[in-house]
Image (cartoon, helix red, strand yellow):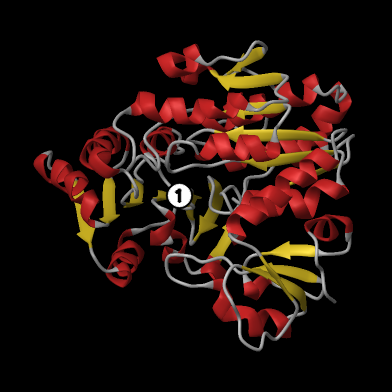
Amino acid sequence: MALNAFEDLLNEKHLSHVADSRLVTPGSVFYALRGLKVDGHDFLHQAKQNGAVCAVVDKEIIDPPLPLIYVENVLLTLQLLAKRCVDNYPEKMIIGVTGSCGKTTTKEFIATLLEQELVIEKSPLSWNSQVTMPLCILNLLPKADILVLEMAMSQKGEIARLAELASPQIVVLTPITYAHSAFFSDIEEIASAKAEIFTSKRLAKAFIHQDALEYVEIQKKLPSSFEIFGYEENGDILFKERHMVENVVAAIKVAKHLKVSDEGIKKGLKELKTAPHRFDKKLYKGAVVIDDSYNANPKSMVAALENMPKPKEGNKRIALLGSMAELGAHETMAHQLVAKKALETIDVLLCVGSACKVMFDLFQANGKKAFFFENYEEMKRCFHEIVEENDVVLLKGSNKHKLWTMLDQESSISIF
């Protein structure tokens, strides 16, 4: 099947849009993106074998295995197609969620409440980048009345670009902290980059976490219509942890704004659940484990430590912490901040990653039990030696550490 115009890619409703050849299914358009480590042009044969009907490429291919659409820049083409898709559906609602902490959980909670009474789609997992968010638009917007998208950044201008592509009518700004901060000099620069979401041309309403209003750059760029959210007592919210309650409150406010009934909201609140490895409570060999290991930044680390359940008398709190990535010049300061909170809240520290050495040193200086590892197997062995029934355990660190592997999954039981 040869597709010769961009409009064909949008008008063929049965097509799916994919940038990873492993995810290609019959009827896919494959975007051969060039990454830092791999080049999508090297995977055209795999895309064909998996069922791709054509590929979008930006370099000459000799004897191609499937029909090709030649463009100057594959990524730019993907993004422009996503923008065109949004323009083609002006009647559809798009909700954009950004911030440093709780983006995915808040997105999931919003979707759960809205789907009680509305036809919605949501970005899967943490598909929130310059590549994955446009793919979400192309694949999901035609199917829904409302699309809930997550937006992330690591440099200035990236949120502005995503806001330009999706042009959300409703935006949610979660708390701001040092996350993906290697290219920022201070927290105000990070706040300014997050505030780029307010540049959406169709923006009608913003929901802003109360802590984000502390930053001058947010105050300078506030939209004309916004509502503040934070912690609120609500007997219908099953979560007890402060940061999780705040995520739920944001979702409730969005649902009310879109006229979801009180009955629909109450029904949705009963169906809320955490995403994998995001404050996921598990019972593991008699110990309560908080698996919050999907990713980490200073604010989310502190929140996880503060919200660890209390163990039974005579038992201990254990934290398995991995270093936080992409902090640049803020790395030492951020790990020291977390170390001070850990010193107040836990009994035994197991940490991995060179940046965590400051945590280990602080525990040593204060006579508290701590272990520092460069090998994951040694960390796992130590954990299994010291954990006891009725202990409370926290797994938290950057995604690269995959700290959920510290548990034998077949022995792990999820609990609420």
| Residue depicted at x 45% and y 34% | 307
| Residue depicted at x 57% and y 65% | 33
Q: Is residue 290 left or right of residue 48?
A: left
Q: Is residue 269 above or below residue 52?
A: above
Q: Is residue 30 above or below residue 137?
A: below
Residue 188 screen position, x and y as percent: 37, 23
| Dot 1 amino acid type | Asn
Q: Specify whether residue 134 is in view.
A: yes
User: Furthest-bottom residue in view?
Assistant: 63
Give the image quarter of residue 246: top right
Q: Name the residue under label 1.
A: 295
Q: Which of 387 and 382 is in front in this view?
A: 382
Q: Is residue 63 left or right of residue 343?
A: right
| Residue depicted at x 65% and y 85% | 45
Q: Find numbered disc 1 in the image and state the secondary structure of the residue it sits on.
A: loop
Give the image quarter of residue 163: top right
